[in-house]
Amino acid sequence: MGAVVYMLLCADGSYYVGSTSDDGLDRRVAEHNAGAHPEAYTWSRRPVTVVWSEQFDRITDAIAAERRLKGWSRVKKEALARGDWSGLVRAAKRRGGRERMP
């Protein structure tokens, strides 16, 4: 069973990263916009718009990607949403320009 990882742009300008089943992206976005879950992050930040999504064959890969993206900076998320790979690489570099230790 596969899954989709998605990133939403919320009405307040923030980003939300989530995941759902292979065929559930449209349904899940509709739930976010309908306010189906009052305790959810997006409830007070509607409407939301999908700015990026990727399908994964294995749910474990999708969950790993979701967790990784949730830890990204706003700049990295914006670069991903734009499909700006060089901007994503620049945003991923450490401040101070030093290489990470292996």
Image (spheres, rainbow, N blue to C red):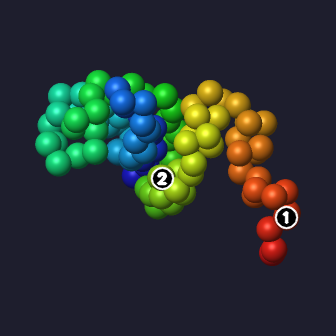
Q: Are marks 1 and 2 in contact (CB under 8 Å)?
A: no
- Give the residue at mark 1: 99
Q: Is residue 28 left or right of residue 102?
A: left
Q: Can residue 21 be seen from the camera position used here?
A: yes
CA gap, disc 1 and disc 2: 23 Å
| Residue drawn at (52%, 56%) of the image | 71
Q: Earlier in the sequence, mark 1 or mark 2?
A: 2
Q: Is residue 4 left or right of residue 38?
A: right
Residue 65 in the image, given as x and y percentages of width and height? 53, 54
| Residue drawn at (42%, 44%) of the image | 17
- Quarter of the image where the C terminus is located: bottom right
Residue 74 in the image, given as x and y percentages of width and height? 55, 42
What is the quadrant of residue 85 in the picture? top right
Front position among marks 1 and 2: 1
Instruction: Please tell me how many numbered marks the rendered image carries.
Output: 2
Q: Secondary structure at mark 1?
A: loop
- Give the residue at mark 2: 70
Residue 75 in the image, given as x and y percentages of width and height? 61, 40
In depth, the one of 75 and 22 nearer the eye is: 75
